[in-house]
Amino acid sequence: MELYIITGFFGMLTIFNTFMILAIVKQAGKNDNLKITRFLPLGEPAPDFSARTITGEEVNLANYIGRDIATLFLFISPNCGNCKTIIDQLETYKNNVFNSGIDIVLVSVGNEEATKKLLVENGVSFPVIFAPQSINSFKKDYKIPGTPSFCIVDTNSKVFATGLAHERVKEWQNLSEIWNVTT
């Protein structure tokens, strides 16, 4: 008898929670302030930015557009385990990425010292931009929700692709497949 009462209670609790979640989702759909915008819209102009490279050079978007090659900005954090995995994968097939018409630039949103340590420990050969999110709006302006994430900007400064850089994310899977088969 007690088992039926407990089971019934949890069943009612589950139904109540389901209705509450549906109500929140419905309200979020009506209220623009509750909507979360992730990533930049494809085909739109990429926002300008100002940041510093590992060598201390000040750079902005103009440094990466107008060339014959698109730029993949890979947003990383030195404390991000998935970032290390993605960096290792990109190092493995960096020539294929470049041959597909894309240059890779790492954008560290974390601490400069920890980033330098990550670069040395992982033998990173890519250009690196420091844009700590505490003092630089690069990550925010590009609507990057977390790391690792990417934004590919084409030669005309338009957003070509953007998303999470993770093996289970379709956009990243598609890019990885292209890079693995390019010779």
Image: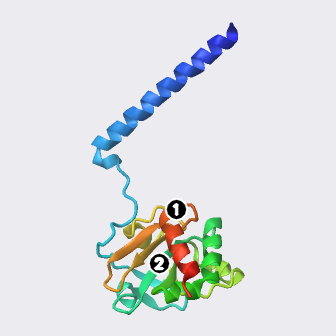
Quarter of the rendering occupied by the C terminus: bottom right
> Horizontal placement of 117 versus 38: left or right?
right
Q: Position of residue 70 (x, y in %)?
A: 41, 85
For image coordinates 54% across by 84% down, the residue present is 182
Q: In the picture shown, does residue 120 fall above or below 164?
A: below
- Marked residue nearer the N-terminal end (1 or 2): 2
Between 44 and 36, the one lying in front of the other is: 44
Residue corresponding to mark 2: 73
User: 75 or 91: nearer the eye?
Assistant: 91
Here the colouring is: rainbow
Q: Residue 94, position in %: x, y?
A: 58, 85
Image quadrant in which you'd find residue 20: top left
Is residue 65 placed above or below 117 in the rendered structure? below
Kind of residue at badge 2: Phe
Residue drawn at 34 percent across, 42 percent down = 28
Q: Can residue 137 be seen in this view?
A: no
Q: Name the residue under label 1.
A: 169
Tally of marks: 2
Q: Give residue 133's mark.
A: none
Comparing 95 with 31, the one in front is 95
Circle 2 sits in a helix, a strand or a loop, which is it? strand
Real-space Cα separation, disc 1 to disc 2, in angstroms: 17 Å
| Point 52% across, 77% down: residue | 178
Whole-percent x and y of residue 17?
Answer: 49, 28
Residue 158 as seen in the image, left or right of residue 2: left
